[in-house]
Each structure stands twice: as C-alpha cells, then as structure tokens.
Amino acid sequence: MTDQLLFSGKQLESIKAKRSEELNDCGMLAKMPLPEAGMAWRESRRPFLGPRTQKDYEGYLGTIVKFFGNVSLEKLADPDLIRLYQMERNKTAGASIINHECSTIQQLLKRIRRWNDVKDFYEPLPLPRESPGRAMTPEEERRLFEAGALNPNWAVAYWAAMLAANTAAGPAEICGLRLADVSTSNPETARIHVHEHVKNVNRAREIPLLSEGLLSRGLTAAKALVERAQQLGATQPEHFLIPFRVSTGTFDPTRHGFWPRTAWREMCAAAGIKLRPYDLRHHALTKMCEVLPEHMVLKIAGHVSPRMLRRIYSHVRLPELRAAMNAVSRSGRENQLPERPGKRGKQKQAMQVVVATADRLKVPLSTAMELLKEYEQALHGGKVKNES
C-alpha cells in the first residue's frame, strides 16, 4: 500500500483552475440581464440538444423574459417570485407548459449555483388527468370525414386526419414528413417513413399505405397531401409534405407546417364530435387491433413492448371478445361459491368461447387473457382475488 496519488500535482492544479474559471463564469452569468443570460445558457446547451428541443427552449425563454424583463438572472433565485410567475401564467396557460418554463428557470439557476435558494419551496403545478385517448365509432368516423370534405378550407385538416386515422402516425409525425419519406407511386410498396419529430427512437418506423381494406384511405390521403405540397412549391425530396405558411398564399416548403388546429376544431364541430388530434392515432391502433396480428400492430405503432399495446385492448371496440370475457368473468365469480356439479363445465365452456373468439378476431390468446386479467382488476377496484 502507498499513499502516493495516481495523478500529478499539475493535473490537480489544472482541474482547480478550470473549476475556478467555471465559478467566475457563473458569477458573470448571474449578473447578466436575463435576456443575455438566457441566450448565453442556450448557446452552451446547443451541442447537446436536438433541433426541436432547441426551439422549445427558445419559446420558454422568450416567455420568461417577457414576464421578468431585463432583471439580472440572480434575481430569479426567489421562491416567492417564481410562485407569482406560476400564478400569473396560470391565468392564460396550462400546467404542463408552465412547468416546462419553470424547469428552464431551474436549469438557469443551477448554472449559477442558486437553485438551492429555491428548491425547498418550489412545487410544480399539478397536471390534469388526461384520458388515454379514444377511438371513434364507425358512425363518428363517417360523420367526421363527410363533414371535412365539405369545406375546401379544411383540406389540410381533412387529409392529415385521414392519414393519421389510417396509419397511426401522430400529428407531429405527419407534420415532420418530407416528400422523400412518402412513397405513393406503386400501391404494392406505398409507405411513409416516420423518423422526424418522433417521441423516442423506438417510434422511428416505416408504415405501409394499404390500397384496399379497412385502412385503405391512408394512401388516398398521402397522395392528396403530396399533390398539394407540389402545388405550393415543394419540389425537392427534402421539402416538407405540409409546407409552412409564411402568410396568406405564401408557403416555405423548407420548413414544416403545423397541425391546422382552427380547421380541425371547426371540422369536429361540424361533425358534432369532440376529438383531440392525437386521438386519431389511438383510433387507428384500435382498428388495427381488430384486424391485424399483434406483432404487425406493434411494428406499425412503434411501441416498445406488447404490454404497452395491450393498454389499448382494455377499451377497444371488440364487443364479441368482451362478451366472451364477461362469460368467463361471470363463471369465475360463480365458482367463488362452493363448487356444484356442472359449474366447472360451464367455466370450461366459457373459456372455449374466449379461445374461439380470440382466434376469429386474430387476437393472440395470451393477449385475450391479459385483457381478462385487466377486466377483473377493474371489476374488483384494482384488486385481483387470489386463487387457491
């Protein structure tokens, strides 16, 4: 054993000098006006952030600067000031965006070593509970697309919604598609390649555009959007499928457009339904779960695991399978009583109904049994009775 260090004194001095330089930079940053400090911080983070995240931070900082003005960054190390910011912002914005903005303030204060002055008193705003999404009934789907076809001003919303409802691509994923990502010339190989604006790396995928069957309208929608993009000046493979509107009648195909929220709300109102844009993805997955094998749905959805997909099965439109599940559930509850002759046969018969129904709907039996388990949990308030 030896007390000799494994590094030289010169290396240690170099690290100390770098640490001292960082502290000096923090002191300078703390004294800077908030707009300059925010810009300096964002530039230092640029090499580690994707384009979308950079744009998000730019928006958060813009809102923060608009509220606080040209105060020095160190002035934000006040929990009461941040609480006031939350209260005022909550009058015009939701909890999620406010929490993101406060997270940006947190990162700024951490950079100048002042977050400890705030952290014991800071609480993020509680987020509202959102539903996992819903699928349209066939009647709602018919009304939505019949209404959308009536108004030419809703064309982008109409075709983008139809593409989403037949491919399970999310709104942001569709807006991030480029012409090179969309192949429609040959119905046998038609597809979209989703790889930009994806939620995570597992969501990058290729989705076939079917020319017939339950999901065949995706190909029609993709062709319509490509034709529209070309009319608006999108001629290169890297140009976006939904070009950015600079002003009325002027478009920039090198920038992606956004989901047409106003047209979408008007279109839903005309159809008499309430639906979020992201519900279209859920609707598409619901339809796929009814007709496609699980492994194909997983690939199209970009889900990481079958368990994630099965969260959809707990409320999809599978009335026959649900009826079979009810039969097994009733039989199982009856068997909680002292066993009588014939009861075991009734449960076995109900189980055979589930097996046959799952086979007819092309739902794996393991998935059907997983649904039964979730269904029983719901019936018992989240608790499953032990079988002994």
Image (spheres, rainbow, N blue to C red):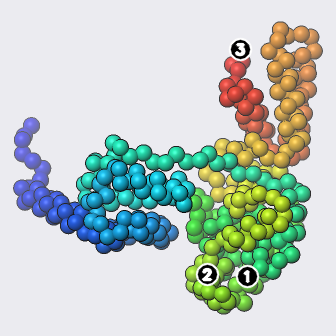
Q: Position of residue 182 (x, y in %)?
A: 70, 76
Dot 3 falls on a residue whose secondary structure is loop
Q: Which residue is mark 1?
A: 226
Q: Which residue is mark 2?
A: 244
Relative to 100, residue 54 above or below? below
The residues bearing labels 1 and 2 have C-alpha atoms spaced at a distance of 14 Å
On screen, residue 86 versus residue 115, left or right, reads right
Q: Position of residue 296 (x, y in %)?
A: 74, 55
Q: Is residue 271 visible?
A: yes
Q: Residue at 35% x, 69% y: name it.
A: 69
Relative to 359, residue 65 above or below? below
Dot 2 falls on a residue whose secondary structure is strand
Quadrant in the picture for residue 347: top right
Relative to 340, residue 106 above or below? below
Q: Residue at 86% x, 75% y: name it.
A: 150
Q: Residue at 28% x, 59% y: name it.
A: 75
Q: Hey, what amino acid is under mark 3?
A: Ser
Badge 1: how crowded within 10 Å, few (<14), some, or many (20+)? many
Q: Hey, what amino acid is under mark 1?
A: Val
Q: Is residue 61 visible?
A: no
> Which of the two marks, 1 or 2, is nearer to us in this view?
2
Q: Which residue is mark 3?
A: 388
Relative to 333, residue 210 above or below? below
Quadrant in the picture for residue 35: bottom left
- Disc nearer the start of the sequence (1/2): 1
On screen, residue 239 versus residue 337, left or right, reads left
User: Number of callouts in the render?
Assistant: 3
Q: Hey, what amino acid is under mark 2?
A: Phe
Q: Quadrant of the N terminus?
A: top left
Q: Are marks 1 and 2 in contact (CB under 8 Å)?
A: no
